[in-house]
Image (cartoon, rainbow, N blue to C red):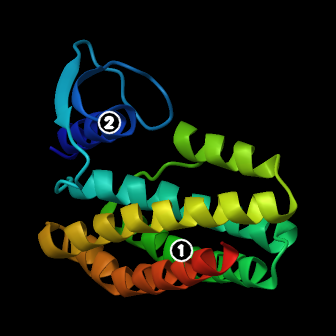
Amino acid sequence: MKNINLLFAACVTAATFQACSGNKTVSTTDSTTVKTDSTTTVKADSSVAALPDTAFASKAAVGGMAEVALGKMAAAKGASQEVKDFGGMMVMDHGKANEELKAIAQKEKLTLPAGLDAEHQAKSDSLSKLSGKDFDKAYVAAMVEGHKKTLALMQTEASGGKDANLKAFAAKNAPVVQHHLDEITKIQAGLK
């Protein structure tokens, strides 16, 4: 049963990453998907629908790893002290959340992704090429967008998740993500 859930979660995760709207056919094989003999069609939209707990865990893990990696980059490359400090907060807060999620995954016998997905890797690559105020603006914009998505993901799992441990993790971390969103929105307003 867990294999079926993991397969379904992998398909939903792959479809979510690949689909902006409408029907998309999923039949890829990267580190976040499982190859099947048939294709799966999933209707995706811009709102965050309730995901299976395994899909939530995978998305949260990738997002958390990205926040830490980009936070380290911001702490090193940021032009403003606010961006540097925010990057440091990302490393600390998301690093702690990542460790909590790993412990839950180990307890629940879930396999989390080991690295960034294509979307987050592309964002990291893009930001790594920037410096100064250009870096700050692009990093801040990425953090606003990312934290809005992560907050919706956490709130959805906290209210509709089935696994008690993952649901509690999401409920505990949603206010932290909201705080991050509030802080980065203030920083963004100051950059204009």
| Mark 1 element type | helix
From the top left corner, tell me how far across and down residue 109 is, in percent.
Answer: 35, 58
| Image quarter of residue 108 | bottom left
Q: Nearer the viewer, residue 30 or 129?
A: 129
Q: Residue at x 24, y 58 (%)?
A: 53
The residue under label 2 is 20
Q: Quadrant of the C terminus?
A: bottom right
| Image quarter of residue 27 | top left
The residue under label 1 is 99
Q: CA distance from mark 1 to mark 2?
A: 30 Å
Q: Is residue 159 visible?
A: yes
Q: Horizontally, is 28 left or right of 24 in the view?
A: right
Label 2 crowd (10 A; few <14 / some 14-19 / many >=20): few
Question: What number of labels is visible?
Answer: 2
Amino acid of disc 2: Cys
Label 1 crowd (10 A; few <14 / some 14-19 / many >=20): few
For residue 132, the mark is: none
Of the numbered discs 1 and 2, the one sitting upstream in the chain is: 2
Q: Is residue 96 visible?
A: no
Tell which residue pokes out farthest to the front in this image: 192
Where 64 sits versus 169, above or below?
Answer: above
Where 8 sits versus 135, above or below?
Answer: above
From the top left corner, tell me how far across and down residue 158 is, in percent.
Answer: 22, 75
| Mark 2 element type | loop
